[in-house]
Amino acid sequence: MYSDISISTYIINLKAPTDRLDYVLSQFAGKPEFDIHPVEACTHSIGAVGLWHSIVKIIHQVNDGEDDVIIICEDDHTFTDEYYIIRFIQNVIEAAGQGVELVAGGIGGFGNAVPITSERYWIDWLWCTQFIVLYRPIYKKILDYEFKDTDTADGVLSEITSHKMVLYPFIAMQKDFGYSDVTRANDEISGKITEHFNQADEKMNIYHQANLRYLQ
């Protein structure tokens, strides 16, 4: 049904180490629904600033183009066993019809969630940007934002739009390479990234089970 759909997908990747690009490209192997574009990450002494500059660089590329929806992911992105093309594309299309500006494939933290469908939840804020779907209405907001050294990309994206959702069960998470290019605190404790995602998954599952119960 969706064999003719291919979403422009921008992979933010630092030149070194090279194993991260090889890893993330392997995640998209055999998935023609993603039109892959590796993007050399912007470097900065503050990792969060470099990530934001990389996101802005991508938005500058697509802002005047025809893509009303794109995917931005980082080179530690990993698909979970819950990824299915038909369900994913359906959610991307349905979210667009609801005026959503950002859909996350998986998150490492959030505050509150509201079920919209059996697979899509509104969230008040999010941690982690390893796989996000962005829609055209958020492009200008990203370009207009004056990013500060104390900001984080996920914090800013949470702030500039209330129209954001996450897919659940999560279809994406971060691979823990044993270090983080962005968050130094995640380097201090081995497995911290995985722990964040596991905790977010457990918390979201409470909402999910209640949602499924009352949908029946």
Image (cartoon, grey):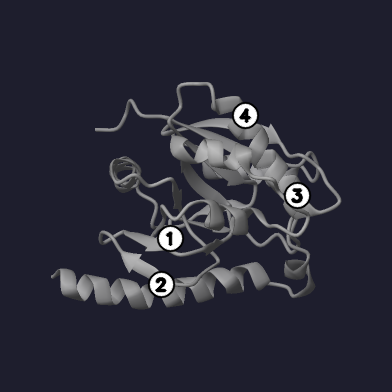
Q: Which mark is residue 170?
A: 1
Residue 63 percent coordinates (x, y)? 54, 27
Q: Residue at x 59, y 33 (%)?
A: 59
Q: Residue at image x 53%, y 62%?
A: 126
Label 2 sits on residue: 204
Calculate the distance from the C-alpha at mark 3 to the C-alpha at mark 2: 29 Å
Q: Nearer the viewer, residue 2 or 43?
A: 43
Question: Which of the two discs, 2 and 4, labels the residue nearer the N terminus?
Answer: 4
The answer to whether residue 164 is left or right of residue 97 is: right
In the image, taking residue 175 as reference, residue 45 lies left or right, namely right
Residue at left offset 76%, top offset 46%: 50
Nearest-to-viewer mark from 2 and 4: 4
Label located before the other in sequence (3 or 2): 3
Amino acid carrying label 3: it is Val
Structural distance between the alpha carbons of marks 2 and 4 = 34 Å
- Residue type at mark 4 is His
The one nearer the camera, 84 or 55, is: 55
Q: Quadrant of the C terminus?
A: bottom left
Q: Secondary structure at mark 1?
A: loop
